[in-house]
Amino acid sequence: MGEPTRPPAAAAELAAAIARLAGELSLAEEPSGFVAGLENDPDTRDARQPQ
Amino acid sequence: MTDWTLASLSRAIAARQVSPVEVTRACLARIERLDAKLRTFITVDAEGALAAARELEAELAAGLSRGPFHGIPLAYKDLFHVRGLPTSCGTRTREYFAADPECTAVSRLREAGAVTLGKLNMTELALGPFGDNAHHGDVQNPWRPGHSAGGSSSGSAAAVAAGFAVGALGSDTGGSIRLPAACCGVVGLKPTYGRVSRAGVMPLSWSMDHVGPLTRTVADTALLLGIIAGHDPRDATSSRRGIPYWERMLEMPVDGLRVGLPENYYFDGIDAEMSAAVRAAARVLEGLGVVITPMRVPDPQPLSEVCNVITRSESAAIHARLVRERPHELQPAVRARLEVGFHISAHDYLQALRLRTRYAREFTACVFAEVDALLAPVIPEPAPALDVVKAGSTDDIVQRMGRFSRLTRPFNGLGLPALSVPCGFSGDGRPLALQIVGRPFDEATTLRLGHAYERATDWVGRRPALA
């Protein structure tokens, strides 16, 4: 079994970072919002050029 | 002809000045002669490549052409599933990824007439920025043996720089296309998240993985992107956006474009020659009429922490079986990075995904309200020596990895298109590189700026002297 029983320090540091940063989140923020945000970027200059 | 660009070789094949078999033989002969030292390939498929080249040659003789990729020899990072060839993902086991069907990007290139030379060396499981590999040999930097080729798409960049393949595909989860491109003096593009299908590519982190080209010129990258980009029903995250004719947009003037030069983070602690070269590149663009705007960008540090949570969680889930069944086969630093993910809670993973959404929205709104693109270094120093990057404890190595990829990782989190372009050489001959970052799905502007810079300088024509 490769999984250690004691969490490495790096995992604790990342958990602390999330605890610190997540206070900024609003209820409207969804995990899947990232792709929608990219797709809905209002400035799209890549419409297909005429042949 | 192994020195030629994709575009020039394509023209020569179309004009029947050289044949697909001739160019394939030339690449295979060069690989045979030089790759024992550089270690760029894991699998060379000489027989398959020549068979494909003969078929393509027969098509040309019959008056049939598949277009600009007809007879062009390419190679793929060894995490792309290619029909008939094993996939090691840089691990000791060559059959690690035996999925079927073939990777969509590879299939599209094959249909377009590309010849597959083989599968390229990489960092084990794509987990590391230096291109060292205990199982398949450390990829050597073609410009300076004994130095890192960058990673994780180490073989992809080094093979293109060495003239073994006209172009290559790599994958980029935290910089793994751009870092080796920068170290090896070639062009590398991480497209927008969703622009290129990842179907048939061994994942490292579903939320951060990107597939993209490595070539000798920006124009070649535009050509390659034009084939592999576009919606794929096999990849739920692939975008349905239209595909521009990027190669035709390269010559559009760049004067009047606004480019931001970050005042914070991206030049902090950067090697003096690297920093000077990127600032000099900004002046070259300014000379072409680009408006260079010094600006503060949102601090990437919180985003980096969020990305770490996401990547570690997902990579641990993906490779849990490997870690459980064959931990002894993994390099210590690779195993250490994977094991962190087993200790991240579902709560923290979900919070990280939510934070990423917020940071991406804020970054785009803040930065691209002011400029069309950002300009920054790719790597904090020229390619470091392999014995230096592998020295010390596992913790030392993991921290070193994080520092080396700190300029590229934020743009995986943001999902933005980011292009690495050569911009000179250090005093001792190691490549320097700049990074051009565009707004979502605006590869066109990043490529135009890169092409304009490339045309205004003469870095792109230089090749490493390989004995």
Image (spheres, grey):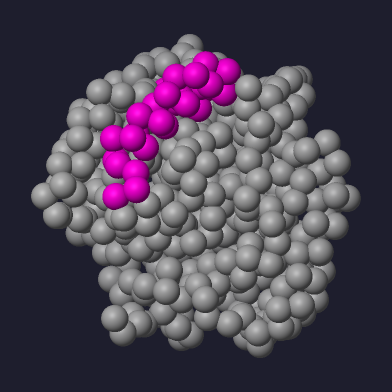
From the viewer's perspective, is B61 left or right of B87? left
* Residue B69 image point, x, y percent: 31, 52
> Please, is residue B121 above or below residue B116 in the view?
above
Q: Which residue is at 85% across, 49% downward? A: B273
In terms of depth relative to the viewer, which is nearer, B352 or B371?
A: B371
> Of helix, strand and loop, which mostly describes the magenta segment?
helix
> Please, is residue B26 above or below residue B354 in the view?
above
Q: Quadrant of residue B87?
A: top left
In the rendered image, the residue lying farthest to the left is B62
Q: Which residues are magenta?
A: B16-42
Whether residue B37 is in magenta: the answer is yes
* Residue B146 image point, x, y percent: 70, 22
Q: Which residue is at 21% across, 56% downward? A: B66
In terms of depth relative to the viewer, which is nearer, B361 or B222?
A: B222
Whether residue B288 is in magenta: the answer is no
In terms of depth relative to the viewer, which is nearer, B347 or B261?
A: B261
* Residue B432 image point, x, y percent: 73, 48
* Residue B96 image point, x, y percent: 32, 24
Q: Is residue B312 visible?
A: no
Q: Is residue B92 visible?
A: yes
Q: Which residue is at 41% across, 79% downward? A: A46
In terms of depth relative to the viewer, which is nearer, B74 or B229?
A: B74
Q: Quadrant of residue B282?
A: bottom right
Q: Which residue is at 63% across, 27% downward? A: B466
> Please, is residue B412 above or below residue B96 in the view?
below
In the rendered image, the residue lying farthest to the front is B17
